[in-house]
Image: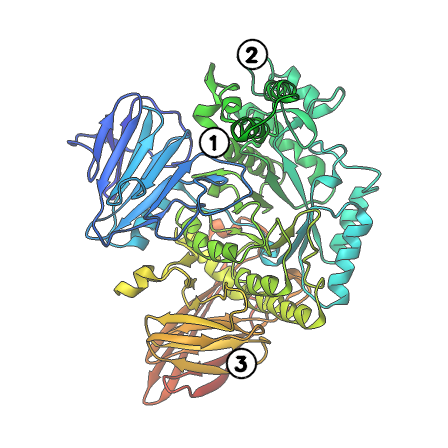
């Protein structure tokens, strides 16, 4: 074991000769130390860590995973998996996020930087023990200190680098469905948003826009004159966001295939021939994204679509997903033929069934292909969790070469720590289940802790049929997630905002309009989190140190100023809420109508009608509110409203930039620093408009402890 000090709060413990994942951006200085702190260590062909948890210890982190924010009682497998049935017994989803924190008598974080399989057994097998089993003996382990949870996270984010920033329009509402089959249908969807006066910034193109499901191609039959169509839609206010899949179709004269074979850019089998698997197009090869030459080649292919006016992409099927391989298919067919005349009992029937069920994403297939890494063949199984990360890295690096100072929308299904520098993620193919709203709520802060700020779920659920109530309640939560996308699968009930009855449509419309009015706050808090290496969604325990705040998992802090308490149960007309301090409640139906109520610290039952969205403004905090519009670029925020709950003094920094470039990294952005102090029942407002060129007026609504509202307007 070799030990390196990154800084006083981060120590790296290197075992063997691990593969460089590029998850960490900082090198350390070698130092001498006795052993790994906190954990019992067992070394051999694998490495096992064991930590005795105290009764009240809370374990947070692990990013995209099942169960609660507190991971105690669960077993989690870090191995990116294409599994659309996100039931609570599943051990892995699409991401591998190997960072967790212990909150108890001891406070520390641990990051296991290893691209292969890891098992996190958090009191599942032995209720009092956290056991980490690494399927290798080459690994980097980072121990991260901090005097509180937020500081530990900030130390981790400083280790792994700057977060991804999309263009500002990507904070608008986005509509997606697998089955918008041609240009006419896409335009019809756009026109329905206009007709129903519902804001929207983007419409997605799923696999049907391609020619025979081939990456970087466009079906001339379904999307003729594609460049003109993209421009036409942009004139209407909509960006089109195409999907890109990991598998490259095996087809003669298809340029991506031909170039990949010629230059040896594909992963190979044991005979060093391009590995063959099947996904959407049928048989495909997988680009070897761990090779920087392959990343550059594939990343520059996005230019085919960028030259048509495309400004955003979503990378999918990049675990990589495998429908079948020839070897697996032959085995299944052979088994079926042998069983044709048998009297299948329970065991022989399930054996036959499992042969076909296990065709997809079979672990033996992942072990049967290889990457060329530093001149050597490395089994994909050993580096599996890096695949989607490096596909998305390829795209991001391509964008920076194609248009160096332009932000593109980019998010991915599969991910690993470090990919947050290049893109966001969505949480994959969920279901129209009420349980998945709660899972969405619990997952957001865990993803933020691992660096993934631009994230969100398929609002309404991808698989299954959603009723109006589910769409309403899910949208009422998703309006706070940076990625707000409604997405559903072919064959399911349509779930666009206008797909339901008139009353439901109007409730969803008001929800989306509230989102646009909140974009000044959402964007400001997002950007400050990126710049300050902080998080956007927080558990209550990140700000409040009472015991109850540590237990609450269905309420979130959003940015600096607000707390949200989403409704996630069917037919619920309210819910239990815990207030760790006195707070100001705004129940929103229409964002232009504002009535407030001051609620006292403690437990309460809150009535919440279907039309209402409860927003709690924290004590001595401010919420900045703008105006809604058809899309983000048409928002006119020359006048902003500031809702402040002030008992003595409050301070807020409102951030803004051009929303398009990376100039913010050079300090080219504006801040309006607002300070409010209450003296002798009067409010004194101080404003420092640092670089502000957009906002001309601030309309204040200041509410005191008794609920009295003081209004004032200040010209800047």
Position of 551 relative to 158 (above/below): below
Q: Around disc 1, counting alpha carbons within 10 Å, would you say few (fewer than 14), some (14 to 19), or many (20 or more)?
A: many
Image marks 3 and 2: residues in contact by CB distance under 8 Å: no
Which quadrant of the figure has residue 650? bottom left
387 w.r.t. 707: above or below: above
Q: Who is closer to the viewer here, 153 or 110?
A: 110
Alpha carbons under labels 3 and 2: distance apart? 66 Å
Distance from the alpha carbon under mark 3 to that under mark 1 = 48 Å
At x 67% / y 20%, what residue is drawn? 259
Q: Residue at x 34, y 52 (%)?
A: 70
Q: Residues within 10 Å of mark 2 (few under 14, many from 20)?
A: some
Q: Which residue is mark 1?
A: 386
Q: Quadrant of residue 589?
A: bottom right
Residue placed most toward the observer, 248 or 224: 248
The N terminus, quarter of image: top left
> How many marks are shown on the rendered structure?
3
Closest to the observer, 221 or 681: 221
């Amino acid at each position: 074991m070799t030990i390196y000090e990154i800084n006083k709060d981060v120590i790296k413990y290197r075992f063997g000769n691990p593969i460089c994942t590029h998850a960490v951006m900082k090198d350390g200085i070698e130092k001498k130390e006795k052993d790994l702190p906190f954990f019992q260590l067992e070394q051999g062909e694998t490495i096992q860590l064991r930590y005795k948890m105290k009764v009240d210890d809370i374990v947070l982190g692990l990013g995209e995973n099942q169960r609660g924010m507190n991971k105690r009682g669960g077993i989690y497998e870090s191995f990116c998996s294409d599994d659309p049935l996100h039931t609570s017994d599943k051990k892995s989803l699409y991401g591998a996020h190997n960072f967790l924190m212990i909150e108890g008598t001891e406070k520390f974080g641990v990051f296991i930087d290893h691209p292969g399989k890891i098992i996190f057994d958090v009191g599942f097998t032995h209720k009092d023990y956290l056991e980490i089993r690494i399927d290798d003996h080459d690994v980097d382990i980072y121990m991260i200190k901090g005097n509180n949870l937020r500081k530990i996270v900030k130390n981790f984010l400083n280790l792994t680098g700057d977060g991804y920033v999309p263009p500002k329009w990507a904070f608008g509402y986005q509509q997606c469905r697998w089955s918008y089959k041609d240009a006419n249908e896409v335009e019809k969807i756009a026109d329905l948003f206009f007709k129903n006066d519902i804001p929207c910034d983007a419409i997605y193109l799923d696999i049907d826009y391609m020619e025979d499901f081939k990456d970087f191609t466009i079906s001339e039959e379904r999307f003729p004159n594609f460049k003109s169509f993209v421009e036409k839609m942009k004139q209407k206010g909509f960006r089109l966001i195409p999907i890109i899949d990991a598998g490259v179709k095996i087809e003669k004269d298809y340029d991506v295939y031909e170039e990949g074979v010629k230059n040896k850019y594909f992963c190979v089998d044991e005979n060093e021939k391009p590995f063959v698997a099947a996904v959407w197009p049928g048989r495909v090869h997988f680009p070897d994204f761990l090779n920087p030459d392959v990343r550059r080649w594939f990343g520059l292919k996005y230019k085919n679509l960028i030259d048509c006016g495309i400004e955003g992409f979503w990378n999918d099927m990049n675990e990589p997903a495998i429908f079948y391989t020839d070897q697996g298919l032959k085995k299944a067919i052979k088994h079926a033929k042998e069983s044709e005349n048998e009297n299948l009992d329970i065991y022989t029937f399930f054996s036959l069934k499992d042969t076909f069920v296990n065709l997809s994403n079979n672990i033996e297939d992942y072990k049967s292909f290889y990457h060329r890494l530093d001149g050597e063949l490395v089994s994909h199984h050993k580096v599996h969790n890096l695949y989607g990360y490096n596909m998305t890295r390829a795209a991001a690096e391509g964008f920076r070469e194609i248009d160096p100072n332009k932000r593109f929308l980019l998010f991915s299904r599969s991910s690993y720590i470090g990919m947050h520098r290049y893109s966001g993620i969505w949480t994959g193919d969920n279901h129209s289940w009420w349980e998945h709203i709660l899972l969405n709520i619990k997952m957001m802060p865990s993803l933020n802790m691992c660096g993934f700020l631009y994230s969100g779920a398929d609002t309404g659920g991808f698989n299954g049929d959603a009723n109006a109530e589910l769409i309403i309640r899910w949208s009422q939560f998703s309006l706070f997630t940076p990625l707000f996308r409604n997405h559903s699968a072919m064959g399911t009930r349509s779930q666009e905002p206008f797909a339901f009855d008139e009353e439901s449509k109007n409730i969803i419309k008001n929800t989306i309009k509230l989102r646009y009015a909140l974009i000044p706050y959402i964007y400001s808090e997002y950007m400050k989190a990126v710049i300050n290496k902080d998080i956007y969604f927080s558990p209550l325990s990140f700000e409040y140190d009472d015991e109850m705040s540590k237990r609450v998992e269905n309420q979130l802090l959003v940015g600096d100023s607000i707390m949200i308490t989403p409704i996630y149960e069917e037919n619920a007309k309210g819910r239990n809420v815990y207030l760790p301090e006195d707070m100001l409640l705004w129940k929103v139906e229409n964002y232009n109508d504002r009535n407030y109520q001051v609620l006292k610290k403690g437990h309460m039952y809150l009535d919440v009608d279907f039309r209402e969205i409860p927003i709690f403004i924290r004590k001595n905090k401010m919420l900045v509110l703008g105006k809604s519009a058809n899309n983000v670029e048409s928002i006119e925020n020359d006048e902003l409203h500031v809702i402040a709950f002030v008992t003595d003094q409050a301070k807020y920094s409102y951030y803004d930039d051009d929303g398009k470039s990376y100039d913010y990294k050079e300090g080219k952005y504006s801040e309006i620093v607002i300070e409010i102090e209450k003296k002798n029942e009067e409010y004194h407002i101080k404003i420092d408009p640092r670089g502000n060129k957009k906002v001309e007026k601030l309309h204040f609504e200041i509410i005191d402890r008794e609920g009295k509202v003081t209004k004032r307007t200040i010209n800047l």
